Image (spheres, rainbow, N blue to C red):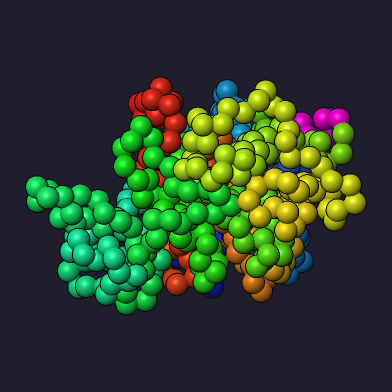
Amino acid sequence: MSNENKKALVVDAEVLVYNPESIKTLRKGGNILYIPWAVLLELEQLRGKPESRLEADEAATRIEEIRNQQDGTLRVFQNPSFANLDGLNRKLAKHHVIATAKDLQADMQKNKGKRGGKIDFESVEIVSREPIVRILAGELKIVAKDYLSDQVPVREYRTKEIRVPATWIYRESFPYREEFEKIEQNEGVICVSDCNPTGVFCKSFAAIRKGDSFKIISKEIEAAGIRPYSLNGNGPNWYQYIALEQLLDPEIELVFLQGGAGSGKTLLALASAVEQKNHYGRIVITRPMVHLEDEDNMGFLPGNVEEKMDPWLRPITQNLNLLKMAKKKGGEDQAASASRSFPISGGKKIVKKKRGVRGKAGVNMKDGAEGADKYDKIDFIPLDYIRGTTFHRTLLIIDEAQNLTPHQVKTIVTRAGERTKIILTGDLGQIDRRKMLNERSNGLAYGIATMNGPPAVGVTTFKDTVRSHLASLAEERM
């Protein structure tokens, strides 16, 4: 094969863990993938971290399989020279990436034009997820790029408004019209009509597209005693109406809820799960256990798996407590800011563990939320246990999905079995794994961008936060 346009690509561990499939992607077109020895050692260390162990294992397996093929497209590079690389640290794998690329550059220049030379590439590039590595490489005249294959454009998903006659509010549905801007299947819209006697158009109701028509969302919609909630009398929270309709529609198998803190996405997801427990048979809840400084502290915490997970599950258990309180309040208008109406008492758990239920992290919902007396458990399962498992007749909630990689989201969604619904909630403005993820490269953004449109998928982006004035102000300005 000709060397023309073939590249030597030096990769860091962050790329391999971000998406193990990068090992295949980067070698397309005859490119040669170079993995420094120090990067392999770092990959071994990443196998001990909670959010990367499965990806590190998969990357190592792929590397071994390709090496066994002996086709020369993947090479391990040992002992790069650090000569004339003042300031770089031999103890850092990321600096070995730069030194390796510099060595390959020197070899390429040395053998350029020689007949029978051993160099079988035309250029050298670094592929790294770390901006500092790319900056340092650029200063050394080495081309360095981010891994872009799974990144999606940053775009603002807004809920569209359409004008309709006021009399349509009494219908159950209305036809799709060409004059409406493009609206995807299951996409929610806010319907504006001249319902005001003064002739001023106002927001009258919400609807979602179903085929060639729109289904009007009932203003009485609720789940487990939870109804859409407005703050300070500012009118209905139409985003919550749309979200509840998508969550309760059995034809929608995958739902993305994206919004800021206090928008109600997690509580609505939980309420819909409680409401539909008999249909799906089982509720499974998980969320990434994002650690301070990306260190695995879970193993040092006392107790069993459930007790170790408690700090990460506290937002979930608090919302389950609110569902119980909603029932006691008789189903008043409760939703996103139930904490505003129902203060949470100092961490005291109302939801208690039940002995003898299946799984390591069962929660007894008896005498809990609306309809909870019809079933006995919700499973809290670590993310590592979720991936690789096929779920049947299950409603699976993945909270804080913005802290997952696209590869992790794909791994979970592609394992959905029969009669299974997956709900991913998150806030694209609150990404905690900044070393690896950003607004374009996280799993929630990737999932929304790639999956939005088919009849089995629904997406809601919340605009309103149902919080105190101060909390809303901080969310907007800080």
Between residue 444 and residue 457, name the one nearer to us. Answer: 457
Between residue 441 and residue 96, name the one nearer to us. Answer: 441
Between residue 393 and residue 40, name the one nearer to us. Answer: 393
Measured as percent of width and height from the top left, residue 337 is found at: 49, 36
Residue at 9% from the left image edge and 47% from the top image edge: 198
Measured as percent of width and height from the top left, residue 39 is found at: 69, 43
Res. 204 image quadrant: bottom left
Measured as percent of width and height from the top left, residue 417 is found at: 67, 71
Left-right relation of 142 to 196: right
Read off the magenta span.
297-302
- Regarding residue 16, the answer to whether it shows in the image is no
Left-right relation of 76 to 243: right
Residue at 71% from the left image edge and 69% from the top image edge: 392
Q: Quadrant of the C terminus?
A: top left
Which residue ends up furthest to the left in the rendered image?
Answer: 198
Left-right relation of 194 to 49: left
> Is 323 situated above or below 471?
below
> Is 173 situated above or below 298?
below
Residue at 41% from the left image edge and 53% from the top image edge: 241
> Is 396 situated above or below 229?
below
Measured as percent of width and height from the top left, residue 278 is found at: 68, 65
Residue at 65% from the left image edge and 47% from the top image edge: 369
- Regarding residue 194, the answer to whether it shows in the image is yes
Which residue ends up furthest to the right in the rendered image?
Answer: 356
Is 369 inside the magenta-drawn segment?
no
Q: Quadrant of the N terminus?
A: bottom right
Is 300 inside the magenta-drawn segment?
yes
Between residue 68 and residue 427, name the one nearer to us. Answer: 427
